[in-house]
Every structure is written in C-alpha cells, then in structure tokens.
Image: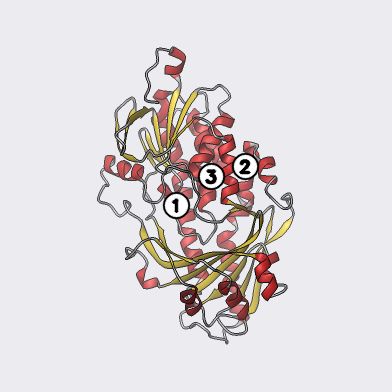
Amino acid sequence: MNTTTNDNTANQKLRVAIIGAGIGGLTLSAALGILDHERNLEVDIYESTAHITEVGAGIGFWPRTWEIMRALGVEKKINEFLPEIPDDGPHIAFQIRKSDQKEGFHVQDVMIQGPFFRLHRADLQQILLSQMSGRLHLSHRLSSFEETEKEVRLHFLDGTTATCDILIGMDGIKSAVRSGLLLKTGLSQSLFLDPVWSGTVAYRGLVPAENIETVFPGHRAINTPMMMYLGKLKHLIVYPVAHEKTLLNIVAFVSDPSKEGTVYDGPSSVACTQEEILSAFSGFEPEVQVLLRGIDHPSKWAINALVPLERYASGRVLVAGDAAHAMPPHQGAGAGQAIEDAYILANLLCHKLSTKEMVPKVSEVYNAVRSPEGNRVLQGSILSGRLADLVSPGFENVKEGDTDVPLEKLQELAGLMGKEWDWVWKSSAEGDRKRALEMLESELLY
C-alpha cells in the first residue's frame, strides 16, 4: 500500500486499510475477497501483534449471523468443525435456573427457530484466515493518521507509513482509529473516547466436559446449548464448545450497579484463584459449585463497554466491531455485530459505484445503517445483563439467597429476557444490506 507503481490499473484500485486482525477484521478481509468479483480492491490488514491470537473460547452463531456466513459461502468450512450440521428447526437457546440458593430450580427454557451453535474462536480464525484477501502486516501498531481530501496517511509505531483511500478501524475497544476519528470530528475530549466500566467483573474458565461428567454424572450443562444460572447481582453463563474435545466455557459475573459508568481501577484482566470464585458464589447450588471447582486456571476480567457513539464514520475514516460498539457479552452478540459490520461494509465496497471519489458517501451510508443498529445492540446487552442479575422492577427488595421469589415472577423476567434476545433469531441483516446498497445508488441519503 505504501509502494509506488506506474500501473494505471493498480492506481485505479480502491485501497482499503483494515486496522486489526481480530474476528471483525478477518471477516471483512474474507468478505472482500469473496465479493470483489472484479478485483477492484487493494486490501491491507495491519495487526499490532507479532502473532494472531484469539482471546476467549466460543463464539455464538445465532440465525442472524449464520445467515451472513451462508451468504458468504463459508458454511461448509464451518460445518467441518461442528459435531452436527445446523438445521432450521426449533431449538432450546438457553435454559434458565434460579441458582443462588442451596436448592436451585428451573425457571424456563427459551426456544428459538433456526440454528444456534458455538464455534471455538481458534477454529473460526482458521476458517477466516483461509479465506483472507489482501496482505497481512504483523507487528504494525497504528499510532496516528492524517486524512486529506483524496487519501489517508497512516503512521505506525515502528516508524513505517502507508496510504489508503479508506481507513477501517477494527482495532478493538481501545481503538486508535476511534481516537483519531473523534479528534477529527472535534470530540477528542468526549465521553466516547475511552471505554467505561459496566460495574461487572467476569470470572472465566474452560473445563473439559468429561471432568464434570466424572464428578457429576448427567450434569445438565454438558448437553444444554446454554445454561443461565441466575442470582441477585450474580449470574453464570455456561455452554459447551467443541474443540478437539468438548469443553465447557464458564463465565461467572459479579456486579455492583453503583460502579456502572466509572473507570475500572486495575488491569482489565488478571489471573485469579479458584478460592476467589468459590467465595463469590458460595451460596449457589451444588451443580454450580461443581463447575467452578473444575476451573484449574481461572481469570478475572473487567467488563468494559463504550458509551454509544454518535457517528461510526466521517469522510474516509470508519470504525467497526468493538472499536465502534464494544458491549458487554450479555447477548452473546459482540462478535456477531462485528461480522455484521464487515458484511455491510464489504457489500458497499464491492459495489461498482464505490470508487475513490465515492468513499465519503460509502462512509455516510455505513454510518446511517450501522450506527443505530450497533448502538441498539450495545444498549440491549446492558439491559440483558441487568435482567440476569435480577435488577428489574419488582426485584428491588430481592436479596442474594432469597428462596421465596415466586416462580411466576421469575418466569415473567425470563420472558423479558427472551424478548431482549429475540432479534438474533427473528430478524435478518439482509434488509440492512439491501437498504445500504439502495442508499449508495441514490442521489440523496434517506
């Protein structure tokens, strides 16, 4: 991208710079390669690390995200990593229990229509790398950029530079591209600049399912797509992930609503002891205790998020994925939203009208379509976390360990949770894709 050529064809190509080779950046690269039939794009991906690694275990594929992968034609590659082929029939999305007591009880099963499965991040990464288009530059951390009317000049910490026609920041919650975008739009001192703490910490760990089966035969978390163990200001999400052998991904949340919107004091993630987790959940039912005791090397994460941005794009600079709408994981939608950003962007950039001169309009269309949706999901994820922590009207006086909370009241709460989640299986990104292309083709934005 920073090399000079006299080839007129090459000079006419739209130069796309993607900052960040996480799930969002790799999906965008793959989608551009798949959809750019005329080969009108020149794509460069800049990754700050020396090696591509993925933090976390499983990525949830809901019907909305699975439809995108089908549209990109990568479903067969994904199927190779799954124990069974996803189908469009009814499925249990998750099972809800009231668990912050010695004898927990079943509250409700939440059903969906369409496929739902978990894929290990390392496996998805392998699939996307096999489909990647463009050049991958490792050990390239963006320090700043300068935008002119015709291009963007990138500056990296190692002293190298590059130029592009459109800069897409998929560089995570601490995005350098977002900082530059806010600076250029006069918002460098705004609340949007840095992530804020949600007031929640998450204890994470992976446990071989066979280990749990040995000490607790028939444990429901092994064969249930997702278990949700609820308690006051504490809850757990547990689901199986197939990766060489079946693992149980355990995420245990502890919340302090008074700290929401503050800055977390300490590193965003640290190793912790098993004793710390067991102490936090000492009042939970035995099947939860078994899961927590199975985590040999737990970690503790501060759950941070962004204040919803007013804009995701301006001129030749865009942000996407966590750089645009980093959210708590309470709807399992963070990676899916990054994939959706990539899908919409790839369709816009591969359109015949997307010339160098049209980049500012592409940015406006992307912003008009994706910023309302990304911000909606961000705010919905926050609300879903509150509901899972029994923070809802009618639960103000409920305390951890209360055994007299009426089942009907909990079922009503579960219904609210289901409604907050149902967009992932009842709606489609295809409408947004079509609307984006119509807007690009129109003389004026709607």
Question: Can you see residue 61?
Answer: no
Q: Within the image, what quadrant is residue 146 found in?
A: top left
* Residue 147 drawn above or below residue 9: below
Question: Can you see residue 404?
Answer: yes
Amino acid on which disc 3 is placed = Ile
Q: Within the image, what quadrant is residue 7 found in?
A: top left
**Residue 66, x across and y down, in percent:** 63, 47
> Measuring 73% from the left and 57% from the top, which residue is drawn there?
90
Q: Which mark is residue 339?
A: 3
Q: Secondary structure at mark 3?
A: helix
> Measuring 33% from the left and 24% from the top, which residue is drawn there?
150
User: Residue tagged by mark 2?
Assistant: 69
Q: Within the image, what quadrant is residue 70 found in?
A: top right
Give the CA distance from mark 1 to mark 2: 22 Å
User: Which numbered disc flags the more N-terminal residue, 3 or 2?
Assistant: 2
| Nearer to the camera, 365 or 160 | 160
Going by the image, does 97 lie left or right of 398?
A: right
Circles 1 and 2, Cβ within 8 Å, touching? The answer is no
Circles 3 and 2, Cβ within 8 Å, touching? The answer is yes
User: Badge 1 local density, few (<14 within 10 Å), some, or many (20+)?
Assistant: many
User: Residue tagged by mark 1?
Assistant: 375
Amino acid on which disc 2 is placed = Met
